[in-house]
Amino acid sequence: MVAPAGYLLDLDGTVYLGERLIPGADRAIAELRSRGRRVVFLSNKPLQSRADYAEKLTRLGIPATEDEVINSSYVLARYLSQRAPGATIYAIGEAPLLAELRNAGFTISEDPEKIEYVIAAFDRTFDYHKLNVGFQALRRGAHFIATNPDRTCPVEDGEIPDAAGVIAALEATSGRKVEKIVGKPSHHTVEVALERLGLPADSCAMVGDRLETDIVMGKSAGLTAILTLTGVTAREAVSEASVKPDYVIASIAELPGLDADLDG
Amino acid sequence: MVAPAGYLLDLDGTVYLGERLIPGADRAIAELRSRGRRVVFLSNKPLQSRADYAEKLTRLGIPATEDEVINSSYVLARYLSQRAPGATIYAIGEAPLLAELRNAGFTISEDPEKIEYVIAAFDRTFDYHKLNVGFQALRRGAHFIATNPDRTCPVEDGEIPDAAGVIAALEATSGRKVEKIVGKPSHHTVEVALERLGLPADSCAMVGDRLETDIVMGKSAGLTAILTLTGVTAREAVSEASVKPDYVIASIAELPGLDADLDG
């Protein structure tokens, strides 16, 4: 067997939980890097910039650059850049998403007559005005894309509504269906990550704590899929899953050991 | 045949269009009243108080009192008063809906631990904070009721998102389904209207411009269903409708003529 040349690492639940590093995650990633493995960090959240994530990882003891982080805002910007460079966009999302889109050369507009793409994202500043602008543009035929499909986002004391609420409100009022959701488990996220690693799918492993996003995405794209048990999934859930991981590890701290075994 | 003793009259599209009276609506209703017919006015909109509607009708030449108006806020207040008098409620809606609920003796709260009923309504002040409060209460087991099912509301220059957006956002994030929608075409609206008229269903007629709400509701509740063509429905649509009206009139101005024919 051959160990993966590249690792796609989910962040929340895999590398850290909120502000707390998963014990040993720093040493594990340093060890993999010392063996020459390439890593990218993945998040479905469009709430922070890639630079924010890099800064947080570095602060927690995992040196990282903006280029090593891929979130759903970035995947979206790449997706649109390939299909409609310079398009006029209306995004229901927070400031870092708008900044990512502006940086990629898109024009942000609130004029339904001009909007070519309506973007639905996780947005804690969502309101009726945004819903109405998106609705008016969709009624006039704008494309309808979303960053991520999540119903809820875990927070310190529970969960809060995620992008699914914005998508559903637009769908229910406009009668349109979202055309594409680019974040995990979409293949668009894997493609951007592999492009960044410069490696083919069968040389890489996806490591994450969610069966329905991380593991489904990894398996369907032909990566080795590794489940960690430090997030939302308990070991008992694996036997009932329709798509099963190739390997289950208690924590990312065990990843260097698995990597060594695969290198045997 | 016997003419109806009572008429349930839809408002927008039937009695008026926005601020403009349907020509002859004032004389038609005066004529019916002079024959001893009782009338109530129905609206699915929870945006104005019943007193506001009565004032508008009176201003447009149709003298009306608050007691002759039934909107979805009022139907909701009646529905809850029968099932959970004095309950603690969180309503995603505008000020007149909250006033109707307070007047009916309910406590309005933003504390998810205390909220027993979450109400989804047409709300042009909808925002993420409201979505999150509703979400948290639904996750803790609160009941989930809506005023009206409409996707959109017609306005002077088009349409704007209606209550369906609020319902969908709550459903998609909480994983809960709305338990009851009390406005048209629900039987709850008919029941409140008949109670107000003091008449049985088979002595009354429902008059409105929408096949899927006014006519469906009238027929399923056992009323005579009369479609007007001054609103959203064209005559050609009637032949394709799965639920057909008993009578089609060009305008409410023809209602006294139909009433006289039925009295033959």
Image (spheres, coloured by chain):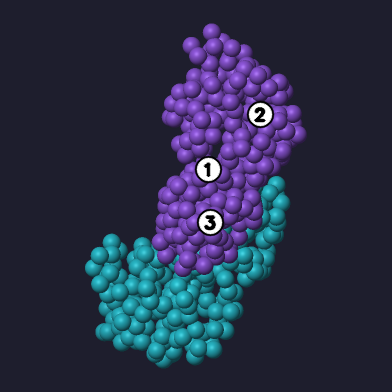
Chain colours: A purple, B cyan
Q: CA distance from mark 3 to mark 1?
A: 14 Å
Left or right, B155 with reference to A10? left
Pick the front one: B63 or A26? A26
Element type at mark 3 = loop
Question: Residue beneath label 3, please?
Answer: A106
Residue B246 vs A214, above or below: the answer is below
| Residue found 46% across the figure and 68% down from its top | A113
Question: Residue beneath label 1, please?
Answer: A75
Q: Answer whether labels 3 and 1 touch (C-beta < 8 Å).
A: no
Element type at mark 2 = loop
User: Going from the N terminus, do you reach mark 2 or mark 1 first?
Assistant: 2
| Subunit under mark 3 | A
Q: Is residue B164 visible?
A: no
Question: Residue beneath label 2, please?
Answer: A15
Q: Position of residue B87 (x, y in %)?
A: 66, 56
Q: Between label 2 and label 3, give the one nearer the viewer.
A: 3
Q: Give the quadrant of residue B48.
A: bottom right
Number of numbered labels in the structure image: 3
